[in-house]
């Protein structure tokens, strides 16, 4: 159990007095700052369709994000959730013709987004694509699916994927809005050659396009009438020569500044091919009607010529000053790359960042114009070839000389350079006088730079956005400049511009040098943040401030069993109001002690934790001799460290040796007499004179340091002894104390067994001799280490052994089992081979001779056990591996003496692979003819030592005879089988497919002959035996015939006459379930449906397969190629799909496995025309319904009933019917029926039944036995008279039946009419149910709108701690007596009263008095429960200043209460359930005080988010103003069970200060009542006002305003109210025909307390004298009945809104409600609401159950404290039932707090 003082400290509860309440905890519904994640990527957006992203635009007014991609345009909200998207391709298109009719083939062509621009002035989104010759269209900013303007005849953008296009909005001539475009020539392959489109002349290189809202949109802003070819455009037009193909210009970036437009490009230095590529900048005047001011200048950035991306942005104040510019002045930033060669335009991964002042750019342009006016310069080479001439014109926008090519380059030195980095994007921002640049790289990283000077910058952070994917050049900030949108190829990320939240300490924060971040130092929560987030504290910036730091701590370390006061010397210690504390982080625990700031302000004193607590915490870590903790100084109540350092606790007693005790800096002492290390030798050492002290010890003695320790000195590097032998050991010693150490022993630990022998100190006192000991172990291991120690005295204390001495005990017989291995052992073991066939030492060899490797003897009986391979081609050089035993000891023993089939085998090349005695590797020699023989090894050439193989090795001649198949796809993967003889010969077999060279016999061209060299493609061998080789072909570089070649080591064999042909990869055009109807393909879980596949080259695949993807698994089935264009596949089986499929088909992706043709692996996703694979449920075949399931067969057809939802399961061969042993031919298949023609004669039976069984096989797998078939074979043979009699009786019987039927029909006519009416009713209900279910399910699947996580915009205000505590203690009071002064009629008596109260306060502080006082009051029978509650509240007010005393009183009272309960006969479980005693009322208040950090800092925000989210979801649909029922509800009772037609509209509501003319958009429904509209409008207008002080809707009238004087007052009930008898329906917005965008106004009523003067006063509710509204009950949250509507209900009239309450259970012809029969239909709406709120509920409970917990129990500390008390009480009263204590805890905690 935790001490009370510690508990009260950890709750951070601050004392307060009720005449001056302190800083408080907030109410549960107050607003807190949003939690921030360390991850800088806030959110991401991807498209599952994998559309390549091209461009991004952010609307600067509202932050809406627009993305242009290949074939798609998206509209995203600022959090990257999709609001709208539109498909822009692919469409049929041809570069040879315009949009519309075309005589050429028009394949499906992808549409690459080239231009994406937001035009705020017109609410336009300008989109230009690559198809249809590069046309543009204007879309609605609010709905990108809506096309506002489109011009098919104006070609603007480049018409292929790679040609560049840059566009931006600007002013044009005559101040018209224009689109400025720079377009690279788009080249295409036309008629087999590279050329440009014939329509390219209509797309100039640079142009200015009008955006006037007319039919001429996107036409040139100005165009002179013919024959002049002048206007706002520039063409390639020099002398009629076409430079489009030979002089490409790549446009990188464009912008506008002042009166000029600028474009940045990459192009060659001149028209001549081979000149280097450079970067240029183009400028022309906005007002220029003929582009005569069009001027080019070279743009230089050091040695980096190629511009990759650019941006215009502001400079920070400091950097701007170094450029002699004003703060936030704009500059041009560009990232440049080096060129791969001097004449190449290909960039490499060496980059630089350059900054250009726009002022300098304009100045250089102006100088070039001046030089041209003086006659120096020339025109732009790709436009004209004129030279400048002298002119007196000084106009920049109407120069005499057009198209000037500037001669003076615009240059800048690199600000930063990067090696091995490819930069692709740049953006800049200024913050706190700093300039921050964001750079994107080709590998998907964003680099953040802080620029110090024009030539100095540093990278302070890098964020991996999308590894491996280049960052797009479009980097966009959000409107608040707090986030950066980063786009890669297939992902868009929202990135924080700062990384403040990842730094937890001041030094980390300032050390990151992030210009956005600083350390916010407050008493409550110091953290790293941006300056705008530090509202109540000092914000320390990295440029001009320093963090606090610890200089030193005295003492530096401490024995763990001691407690001392530490002095912490701190520099830059901040000034705070609260007290300091010291925190020791020990493992996962935080031990706090009180700290005192000494005079002078730089020294803090604090004591170390109590030794008991410290040792208990360190128990898991005290296996080590010392433990380093983190010592931190904090402000009381704050979890953030001000400063911290490492502090070491040590324990000398953990050191077990003298050497270890000395080798530390802790000042320990070694007690030689007791063999103990201690920090206090005076207490723990017996003989102090013999102690050894460490160098840092303060003790005095003659022995100091580790060199004075008594110890063993090892005399040899290694001590070896064979198991079973004796050894006498001699070791050196030092620093022995003969007077103290009188006897010695040697101890050996041999395999766990301790052996001890006597030892003697030699006369020199430098060595100790151990008597001979037997070293022996029984385990079958080769070596055992036997630790050795010398001990002395009776206590057997060991001498120090700095380098531990071990005796190595070994067994030769375990080290080697064979002779060869034995002789190879290290000579130090003295092992040899004994004649008895074992490896032993010579001492242990008791029989026969013994020899080792030293005497040069070799082992007898060499043996070859196996070898591989077993054959070689005649050419030899097959590598053979020979394995055996006793095959020599060294390589020289066998090297020249290995023969294979009497041919020498070369071993010298494989010397490194030789394993002595056991393995030989050699290569065979070449032979002339086929032969075979043994492998022979002659060790050392001695015929006595010969090893001969038991198997024969053969030389063979491999032969190739054929291949299958003979064709395969170009992508490879064909499983090629090669047939022949001896195909397993050799050690290495490789297969190649060699393309046949072109016939060049008639050509003299050396180039052609050199190009005719054969191309060799490998074929990977996967299987090999003597007659077959199987390999997998690799991808070929082209198609055509090829020769198969196999290399067997050095032998090369070609298969002649049977070439292998590479053909073009198969392609699939279409798939269908039938060749006749061409329906889409599908299948069922049982499989077996036919899939017909059409394409070309299908038959070149040996084993094609159909692949269908369900979940994360692939399901495959085999296919059969009928010819090159047609293939048939069976649909695969889905074993696990039947259980999860349900009744709804699923559309699945599918593809084909066709060797290595991976383009078909996901064919359906890559070719939309192929559609999806539809998986249907298995058809169900019904058994015969006749008795005994025996059906009589009389007609020509047998009808079988089925349930077949599968639309493609009508293939007649899919269903097979068997009657007995013979088939029933299926003639037709329908959704509910199968018809088949049975055999003419009853078939034989498969079973013992009387009749043949009928079996239906579905898909060849699933079988249904549905019954038996009885053939009716008896002939009808009756006499004539019998037939006449039967007919007569039948006629009479029919007459009688007719009479009865007519009478019956007459009686039943009315019943039939009623039944018909009922059927019509039920049919109508069935249709309604189906429609509702369908709509609800679709809404649940697709339209779930998740509420916003961001609630910061609602302006949540919260009570201070004073009001919070008052509402807990006195929940039903408005005027609190404890807050006011005591009212005294006679002021002269006030001192007496104050003195009496002071004395009473002193009595309350007396525990004895207070307990007696409480017990006396509770014993009074007139002391009611209400009195007890009030008394307990006032008592907690008095005691809360001393929580330790308060807790003691509470525990005593609770113990009394439990004791009293146990003495009675009542059930102990009911204890603490109600607040019937003072203690039971004090306990909730105690919990509330101590748990307020949980409510304030954690639970409040998610709980408020949940409340707001519930309201948002409810507002999405209609809600009945009378009953409170809603379409989206969490309660089944409050769910509208009727279909309501409604639509969402947005109205503009004028605020209360209507003179300002500002309106606020409010989202409402057209089915809302007037009061509901007023309520929603007030919630929007007063979102920053506490809910309890907001005005009520009944205080205002709602006016609909139109024009200057049109006004209409809208009311719930007026003359237009719909009246139905005694019922009146409340008016709704649609009753007044209010449209989207209407202007409404809230006008205070004359009788209202609110008037215009109050309404126009800012924050009028903060100081208003109006009484706050009563708190809303939970029912008011679910019902919208206003006071105004309540007054209507009280008048006696019956009013209704959406549903009449009395009609809820009535079924009428067209009921307003569905009635009891279909009430459950609407329950899907509950799922919608719960799904939308799921994450908010989860967040709330996640916070509740993850607050600061006790590390051992996982429980909140105050709760644990009280629970421990209750556990102790249960033990005290011997309560063994755990449910009793559990009930106590639940009653007090759950019922109290939540």
Image (tube, rainbow, N blue to C red):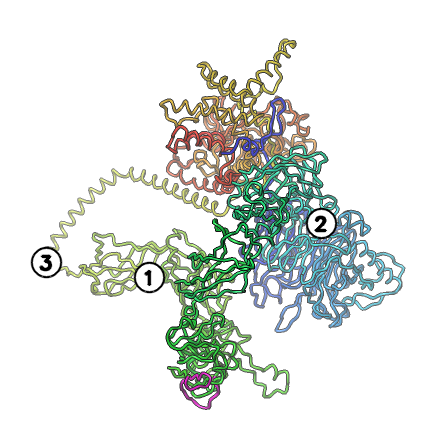
Q: Is residue 511 left or right of residue 294?
A: left
Give the CA distance from mark 1 to mark 2: 68 Å
Secondary structure under the numbered disc 1 in the rendered image: loop
Q: Is residue 1681 visible?
A: yes
SS for callout 2? strand
Asked whether 943 falls inside the magenta stretch, the response is yes
Could you say which disc has been placed on residue 294 in the image?
A: none
| Quadrant in the rendering for residue 1184 | bottom left
Q: Position of residue 126 (x, y in %)?
A: 65, 53
Give the SS element for disc 3. loop
CA gap, disc 3 to disc 2? 114 Å
* Range of residues picked out in magenta: 924-944
Identify the disc placed on residue 429: 2
Q: Quadrant of residue 1571?
A: top right
Residue 1527 shown in magenta: no
Q: Nearer the viewer, mark 3 or mark 2?
A: 2
Foreground of the two, 505 or 1170 = 505
Nearer the observer, 1753 or 1106: 1753
Estimate how packed mark 3 is, as few (under 14), some (14 to 19) or many (20 or more) residues with alpha carbons within 10 Å.
Answer: few
Q: 10 Å neighbourhood of mark 2: few (<14), some, or many (≥20)?
A: some
Relative to residue 1236, is residue 1656 depicted above or below?
A: above
Q: Is residue 1609 above or below residue 1221?
A: above
Whichever of callouts 3 and 2 sits on the residue coming sooner in the sequence is 2
- Mark positioned earlier in the residue sequence (1 or 3): 1
Against 80, residue 971 (above or below) is below
- 1543 and 817: which one is in front? 817
Q: Tag on residue 1279?
A: 3
Q: Position of residue 565 (x, y in %)?
A: 63, 37
Look at discs 1 and 3 and give the one toward the viewer.
1
- Please name the residue that numbered disc 1 is placed on: 1261
Q: Quadrant of residue 1438?
A: top right
């Amino acid at each position: 159990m935790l001490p009370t003082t510690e508990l009260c400290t950890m709750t951070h509860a601050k004392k307060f007095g009720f005449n001056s309440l302190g800083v408080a905890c907030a109410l549960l519904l107050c607003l807190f700052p949003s939690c921030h994640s360390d991850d800088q990527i806030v959110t991401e957006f991807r498209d599952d369709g994998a559309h390549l992203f091209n461009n991004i635009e952010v609307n600067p007014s509202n932050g809406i994000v627009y993305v242009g991609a290949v074939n798609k345009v998206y509209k995203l909200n600022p959090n990257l959730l999709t609001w709208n998207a539109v498909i822009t391709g692919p469409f049929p298109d041809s570069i040879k013709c315009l949009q519309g009719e075309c005589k050429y083939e028009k394949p499906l062509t992808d549409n690459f987004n080239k231009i994406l621009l937001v035009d705020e002035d017109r609410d336009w989104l300008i989109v230009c694509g690559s198809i249809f010759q590069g046309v543009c269209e204007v879309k609605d900013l609010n709905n990108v699916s809506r096309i506002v303007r489109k011009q098919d005849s104006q070609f603007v953008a480049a018409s292929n994927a790679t040609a560049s296009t840059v566009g931006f909005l600007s002013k044009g001539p005559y101040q018209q809005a224009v689109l400025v475009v720079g377009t690279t020539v788009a080249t295409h392959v036309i008629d087999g050659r590279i050329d440009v489109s014939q329509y390219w002349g209509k797309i100039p290189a640079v142009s200015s396009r009008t955006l006037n809202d007319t039919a001429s949109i996107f036409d040139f802003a100005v165009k002179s009438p013919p024959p002049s070819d002048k206007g706002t455009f520039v063409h390639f037009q020099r002398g009629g020569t076409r430079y489009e193909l030979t002089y490409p210009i790549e446009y990188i970036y464009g912008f506008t500044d002042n009166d000029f437009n600028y474009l940045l490009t990459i192009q060659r230095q001149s028209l001549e091919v081979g000149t280097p590529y450079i970067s240029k900048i183009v400028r022309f005047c906005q007002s220029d009607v003929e582009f005569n001011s069009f001027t080019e200048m070279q743009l230089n950035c050091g040695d980096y010529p190629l511009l990759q991306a650019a941006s215009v942005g502001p400079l920070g104040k400091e950097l701007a000053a170094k450029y002699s510019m004003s703060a936030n002045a704009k500059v041009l930033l560009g990232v440049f790359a080096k060129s791969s060669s001097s004449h190449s335009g290909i960039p490499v991964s060496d980059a630089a960042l350059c900054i250009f002042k726009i002022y300098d750019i304009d100045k250089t342009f102006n100088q070039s114009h001046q030089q041209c006016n003086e006659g120096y310069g020339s025109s732009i080479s790709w436009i004209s070839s004129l030279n400048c001439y002298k002119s007196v014109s000084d106009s920049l926008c109407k120069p005499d000389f057009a198209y000037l090519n500037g001669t003076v380059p615009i240059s800048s030195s690199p600000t930063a350079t990067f090696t091995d980095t490819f930069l692709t994007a740049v953006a800049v921002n200024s913050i706190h006088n700093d300039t921050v640049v964001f750079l994107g790289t080709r590998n998907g990283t964003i680099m953040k730079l802080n620029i110090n000077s024009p030539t100095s910058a540093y990278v302070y952070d890098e964020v991996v956005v999308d590894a491996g994917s280049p960052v797009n050049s479009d980097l966009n900030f959000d409107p608040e400049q707090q986030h950066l949108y980063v786009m890669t190829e297939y992902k868009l990320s929202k990135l924080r511009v700062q990384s403040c939240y990842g730094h937890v300490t001041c030094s980390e924060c300032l050390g990151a040098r992030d210009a956005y971040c600083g350390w916010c130092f407050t008493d409550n929560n110091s953290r790293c943040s941006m300056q705008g987030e530090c509202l109540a504290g000092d914000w320390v910036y990295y440029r001009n401030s320093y963090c606090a730091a610890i200089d030193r701590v005295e003492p530096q370390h401490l024995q763990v069993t001691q407690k001392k006061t530490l002095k912490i010397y701190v520099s830059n210690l901040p000034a705070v109001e609260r007290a300091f504390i010291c925190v020791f982080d020990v493992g996962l625990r935080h031990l706090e002690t009180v700290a005192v700031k000494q005079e002078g302000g730089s020294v803090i004193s604090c004591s170390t934790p109590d030794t008991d607590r410290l040792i208990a915490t360190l128990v898991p870590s005290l296996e080590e001799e010392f433990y380093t903790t983190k010592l931190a100084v904090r402000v009381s109540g704050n979890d953030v460290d001000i400063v911290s350092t490492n502090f070491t606790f040590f324990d000398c007693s953990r050191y077990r040796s003298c050497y270890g005790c000395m080798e530390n800096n802790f000042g320990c002492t070694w007690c030689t007499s007791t063999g103990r290390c201690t920090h206090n030798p005076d207490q723990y050492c017996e003989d102090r004179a013999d102690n050894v002290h460490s160098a840092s010890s303060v003790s005095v003695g003659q022995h100091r340091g580790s060199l004075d320790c008594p110890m063993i000195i090892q005399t040899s590097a290694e001590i070896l002894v064979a198991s079973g032998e004796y050894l006498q050991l001699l070791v050196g010693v030092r620093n022995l104390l003969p007077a103290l150490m009188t006897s010695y022993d040697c101890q050996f630990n041999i395999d766990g067994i301790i052996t001890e022998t006597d030892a003697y100190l030699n006369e020199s006192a430098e060595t100790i001799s151990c008597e001979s000991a037997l070293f022996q172990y029984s385990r079958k291991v080769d070596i055992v280490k036997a630790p050795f120690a010398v001990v002395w005295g009776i206590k057997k204390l060991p001498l120090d052994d700095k380098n531990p001495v071990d005796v190595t005990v070994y067994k030769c017989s375990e080290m080697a089992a064979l002779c060869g291995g034995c002789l190879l052992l290290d000579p130090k073991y003295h092992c040899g081979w004994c004649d008895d066939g074992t490896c032993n030492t010579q001492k242990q060899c008791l029989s026969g001779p013994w020899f080792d490797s030293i005497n040069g003897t070799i082992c007898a009986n060499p043996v070859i056990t196996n070898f591989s391979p077993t054959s070689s081609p005649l050419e030899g050089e097959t590598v053979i591996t020979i394995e055996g035993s006793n095959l020599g000891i060294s390589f020289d023993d066998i090297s020249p003496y290995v023969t294979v089939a009497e041919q020498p085998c070369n071993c010298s090349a494989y010397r490194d692979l030789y394993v002595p005695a056991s393995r030989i590797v050699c290569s065979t020699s070449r032979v002339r003819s086929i032969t075979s023989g043994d492998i022979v090894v002659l060790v050392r050439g001695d015929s006595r030592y010969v090893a001969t193989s038991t198997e024969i090795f053969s030389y063979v001649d491999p032969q190739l005879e054929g291949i299958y198949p003979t064709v395969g796809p170009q992508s490879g993967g064909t499983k090629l089988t090669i047939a022949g003889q001896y195909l397993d010969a050799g050690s290495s077999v490789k297969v190649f497919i060699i393309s046949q060279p072109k016939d060049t016999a008639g050509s003299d061209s050396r180039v052609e002959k050199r190009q005719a060299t054969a191309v060799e493609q490998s074929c990977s061998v996967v299987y090999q035996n003597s007659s077959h080789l199987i390999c997998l072909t690799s991808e070929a570089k082209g198609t055509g015939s090829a020769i198969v070649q196999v290399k067997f080591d050095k032998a090369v064999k070609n298969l002649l006459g049977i070439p292998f042909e590479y053909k073009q990869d198969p392609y699939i055009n279409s798939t269908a379930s039938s060749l006749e109807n061409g329906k889409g393909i599908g299948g069922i879980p049982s499989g077996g449906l036919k899939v017909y596949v059409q394409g070309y080259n299908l038959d070149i695949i040996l084993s094609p397969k159909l692949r269908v993807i369900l979940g994360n698994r692939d399901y495959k089935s085999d296919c059969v190629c009928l010819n090159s264009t047609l293939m048939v596949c069976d649909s695969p089986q889905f074993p696990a799909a039947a259980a999860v499929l349900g009744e709804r088909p699923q559309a699945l992706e599918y593809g084909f496995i066709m060797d290595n043709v991976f383009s078909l692996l996901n064919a359906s996703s890559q070719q939309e025309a192929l559609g999806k694979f539809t998986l249907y449920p298995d058809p169900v075949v019904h058994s015969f319904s006749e008795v005994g399931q025996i059906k009589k067969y009389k007609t020509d057809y047998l009808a079988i009933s089925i349930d077949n939802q599968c639309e493609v399961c009508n293939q007649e061969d899919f269903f097979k019917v068997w009657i007995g042993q013979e088939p029933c031919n299926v003639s037709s298949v329908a959704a509910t029926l199968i018809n088949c023609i049975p055999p003419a004669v009853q078939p034989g039976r498969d079973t013992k039944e009387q009749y043949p069984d009928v079996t239906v096989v579905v898909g060849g797998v699933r079988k249904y036995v549905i019954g038996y078939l009885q053939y009716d074979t008896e002939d009808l043979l009756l006499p004539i008279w019998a037939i006449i009699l039967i007919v007569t009786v039948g006629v009479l019987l029919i007459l009688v039946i007719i009479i009865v039927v007519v009478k019956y029909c007459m009686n039943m006519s009315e019943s039939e009419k009623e039944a018909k009416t009922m059927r019509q009713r039920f049919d109508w209900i069935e249709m309604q149910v189906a429609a509702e279910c369908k709509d609800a399910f679709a809404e649940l699947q697709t339209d779930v709108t998740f509420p916003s996580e961001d609630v910061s915009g609602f302006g949540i205000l919260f009570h201070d701690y004073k009001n919070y505590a008052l509402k807990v203690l006195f929940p039903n009071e408005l005027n609190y007596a404890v807050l006011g002064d005591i009212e005294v009629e006679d002021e002269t008596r006030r001192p007496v009263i104050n003195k009496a109260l002071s004395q009473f306060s002193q009595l309350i502080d007396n525990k004895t008095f207070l307990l007696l006082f409480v017990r006396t009051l509770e014993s009074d029978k007139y002391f009611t429960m209400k009195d007890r509650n009030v008394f307990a509240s006032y008592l907690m007010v008095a005691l809360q200043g001393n929580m330790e005393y308060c807790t003691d009183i509470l525990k005593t009272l609770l113990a009394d209460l439990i004791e009293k309960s146990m003495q009675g006969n009542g059930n102990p479980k009911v204890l603490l359930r109600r607040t019937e005693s003072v203690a039971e009322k004090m306990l909730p208040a105690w919990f509330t005080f101590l748990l307020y950090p949980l409510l304030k800092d954690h639970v409040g925000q998610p709980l408020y988010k949940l409340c707001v989210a519930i309201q948002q979801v409810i507002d999405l649909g209609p809600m009945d103003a009378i009953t409170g029922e809603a379409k989206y509800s969490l309660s089944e009772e409050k769910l509208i069970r009727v279909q309501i037609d409604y639509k969402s509209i947005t109205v503009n509501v004028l605020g209360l200060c209507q003179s300002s003319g500002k309106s606020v958009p409010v989202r409402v429904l057209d089915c809302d009542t007037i009061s509901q509209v007023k309520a929603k409008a007030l919630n929007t207008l007063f979102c920053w006002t506490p809910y309890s002080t907001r005005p009520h809707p009944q205080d205002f009238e709602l006016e609909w305003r139109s024009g200057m004087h049109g006004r209409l007052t809208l009311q719930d009930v007026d003359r237009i109210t719909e009246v139905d008898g005694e019922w009146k329906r409340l008016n709704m917005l649609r009753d007044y025909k209010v449209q989207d965008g209407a202007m409404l106004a809230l006008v205070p009523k004359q009788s209202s307390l609110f008037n215009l003067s109050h309404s126009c006063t800012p924050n009028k509710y903060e100081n208003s004298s109006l009484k706050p509204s009563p708190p809303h009950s939970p029912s008011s949250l679910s019902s919208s009945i206003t006071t105004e509507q309540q007054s209507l209900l009280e008048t006696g009239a019956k009013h209704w809104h959406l549903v009449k309450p009395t009609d809820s259970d009535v079924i009428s012809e067209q009921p307003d409600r569905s009635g009891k029969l279909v009430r459950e239909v609407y329950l899907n709406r509950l799922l919608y609401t719960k799904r939308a709120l799921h994450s908010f509920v989860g967040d709330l409970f996640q916070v509740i159950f993850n607050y600061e917990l006790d590390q051992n129990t996982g429980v909140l500390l105050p709760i644990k404290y009280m629970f421990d008390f209750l556990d102790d009480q249960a033990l005290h009263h011997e309560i063994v039932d755990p449910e009793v204590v559990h009930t106590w805890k639940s009653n007090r905690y759950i019922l109290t707090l939540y």
